Image (cartoon, grey):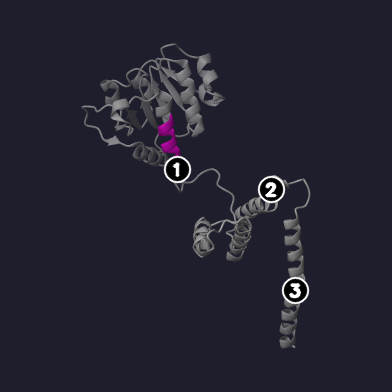
Amino acid sequence: MPDNQSPKRSGPAVILVEPQLGENIGMVARAMANFGLTELRLVNPRDGWPSEKARATASRADHVIDAVRVFDDLPSAISDLNFVFATTARERDAFKPVRSPVEAGRALKAREVAGQHTGILFGRERFGLSNEEVGLADEIVTFPVDPDFASLNIAQAVLLMAYEWRKSGLADETATNFSAPAMTPATKEQLLGLFTHLEAALEARGYFRPAEKKPKMVENLRAVLTRAGFAEPELKVLRGVVASLDYFSPKEPRGAGYPERKARSDRAAHMAAPADEAREAASSGSKDEGND
């Protein structure tokens, strides 16, 4: 007999008709919890209820398991619902609209917004729903599976429908709960710095051979690196890689000392810095004079 205590409703009720294994019921509960569904109804479960196997495989979806309602027959299980979808992979001789999961998810969400209580029927593990049971539903939902292998595990079927229902309620159906960190695109000056660094390292190792082909090789190299659209942190990673390969070697590995080539590079950079500062100061002074 049904439990007279109705749970708090969240989305369509999931109705399993004569489920056979407690483990499958538990996996259904887990799939429901993943996408915010909470109302699970069982019609004449073969091994009875409650089921410790179901709870064990629900993977902490205890709120779904605790709220399960058990019914003796399908008419009783859907009597309070305003609209019901029946899931099936087989073509039926019935005058009922057939929807895809995407359409069904949107229809269920629209009816929920309108204040209707809806449900989705799922059949037995071995042969699904009977024609008579499908006849009690308002519409059919079917999945675009391979006709040669159309049978879905019951938890998989519930997961697909729960996902489509959840997605249909998003302002943007492609939205996700988290995204990649925002990164500032690299400036062309930073990208040119990578070119200069890498090309100098390759030149030092005799990469550009024969010499007459160097312009074309440089052009190809820059075309490859330009296409990626690097962000600043990505360029820093690449510059670090190039620096490690450029200044260190098996004979002079990192940690074995300060390679002479790196020392020369640092000296050149330090010599260039004062000159840059002098030019900047001269430029600033000219601007100040013009403002007097």
Judge by depth and name the residue closer to the eye, 6 or 30: 30
Choose the circle earlier in sequence order: 3 or 2. 2
Residue 207 horizontal/vertical position (percent): 57, 56
Residue 197 horizontal/vertical position (percent): 63, 60
- Residue 226 against residue 57 in the figure, above or below: below
Quick check: is 283 in the magenta stretch?
Answer: no
**Real-space Cα separation, disc 1 to disc 3, in angstroms:** 61 Å
What residue did someone put label 3 on?
A: 275
Left or right of 2, for residue 270: right
What residue did someone put label 1 on?
A: 169
Q: Residue at x 27, y 26 (%)?
A: 90
**Which circle, 3 or 2, is nearer the viewer?**
2
Q: Is residue 124 visible?
A: yes
Judge by depth and name the residue closer to the eye, 160 or 249: 249
Quick one: SS at disc 3?
helix
- Magenta-colored span: 159-167
